[in-house]
Amino acid sequence: MKETCSFCGADEMYPYALGVRDHLRIAHQKHDFYSCKKCGSLRLVPLPTAEYLAKVYPQECHFHRDSGSWLRKLYNQLEWTLFYQPVLRFSNHLIMKETGILSGRVLDVGCGNGLRLLQFSKEGFEVEGVDFAPVNVQYARDVLGLKAWEANIEETDLPLNRYHLLIVYWVIEHLREPVELVRKAQNSLSPNGWAIFAVPLADSWVSSIFRKIWGQIREAPRHIGIPSSRGMSILLERCGFINIKFKPASTLELAGDVALTIWPRGNFFMTTGRWAFLKILDRMILALLTLAGIPLVVLLRTLGIKQGLTVFLAQKGGQ
């Protein structure tokens, strides 16, 4: 049986990054990424089973401003002010600028702890979120006061023709069959609505240079498929989207992606369960590496070189 690309559907794939180790050290076995000859997208071969994947996700891996000791909470607040809040503002303003949608109903698929939705709520949007992790939904609902529900998006249908914006940040790469979610997104949008997909990009300079040690690759087996720009565009076209375009993520996110590749110990999940001083030290090293990487990211963006983290925007046609 031939292996097929999750994005363009072609059936010719060849080895790209073999023997990849999970940088979170949850999965103990190694995994292999193959590249599609037609579009250059990456996919794990063989596909991990749903039962296996259920065992390799941490219970909590999203940033929380109010987690940990008083010292960690103080540092978290600093991170929120200097990194997370500017990143969320950038991404939301990018969405509004590129789509022209300044109000309406928004659904965040894979909403995490709801911080992105909170920013949209402050802009006056009517927001909803869905996530598979109970701890995330509880935080978004009970702490932030947002409308959110728990569901496995691969097994759950979405309301039809309801949303003006549908946001899918850092989810596509986790799915065994991303085409199913993209179709659901298309059906869930109101006419002329927009879907926004943030993904790591297989044909980026980061992937080419770091290959099997790139942080997005070393998220295997949680990262199952990483699209190329062509592969993602083909997938969106297959599902009926029009006016497809893509933009790089924020400079801070791009520099942070490189920093996490160099210093994976700075990952938020990796700093849990350790002494507060060591947690903060690793996060500070990560912050310094992020700052050091900003000039390089700015230069490469200016030259038009594809970045490792990319936002695709696609519109549903009018009816």
Image (cartoon, helix red, strand yellow):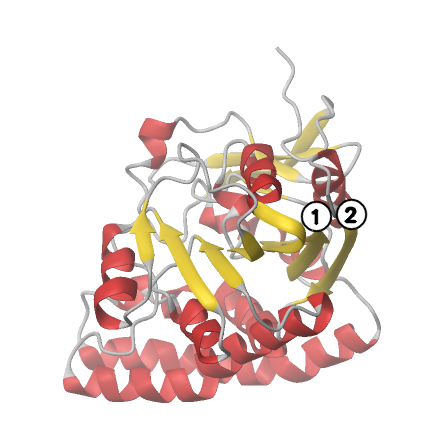
In the image, is 104 to the left or to the right of 150? Answer: right
Of the 4 image quadrants, the one containing the C terminus is: top right
Q: Position of residue 200 (x, y in %)?
A: 60, 54
Asked if residue 255 shows in the view, the reply is no
In the image, is 118 to the left or to the right of 104? Answer: left
Judging by the rendered image, the residue that carries numbered circle 2 is 242
Of the 4 image quadrants, the one containing the N terminus is: top right
For residue 44, above or below residue 190:
above
Marks 1/2: CA distance? 6 Å
User: Where, by quadrant of the figure, is residue 274 drawn?
Assistant: bottom left
Does label 1 or label 2 sit earlier along the sequence?
2
Camera-nearest residue between 138 and 228:
138
Residue 316 got which mark?
1
Q: Residue most toward the top? A: 1
Q: Which amino acid type is marked by label 1?
A: Lys
- Please tell me which residue is depicted at 73% across the width and 51% down the height of the picture: 203
Q: Position of residue 279 (x, y in %)?
A: 27, 75
Q: Position of residue 154 (x, y in %)?
A: 44, 35
For residue 49, above or below residue 109:
above
- Please tell me which residue is depicted at 77% across the width and 32% down the height of the picture: 37
Query: Considering the numbered disc 2 on the image, is that residue within a helix, a strand or a loop?
Result: strand
Contact between marks 1 and 2 (CB within 8 A): the answer is yes
Q: Position of residue 285 (x, y in %)?
A: 42, 80
Q: Residues within 10 Å of mark 2 (few under 14, many from 20)?
A: some
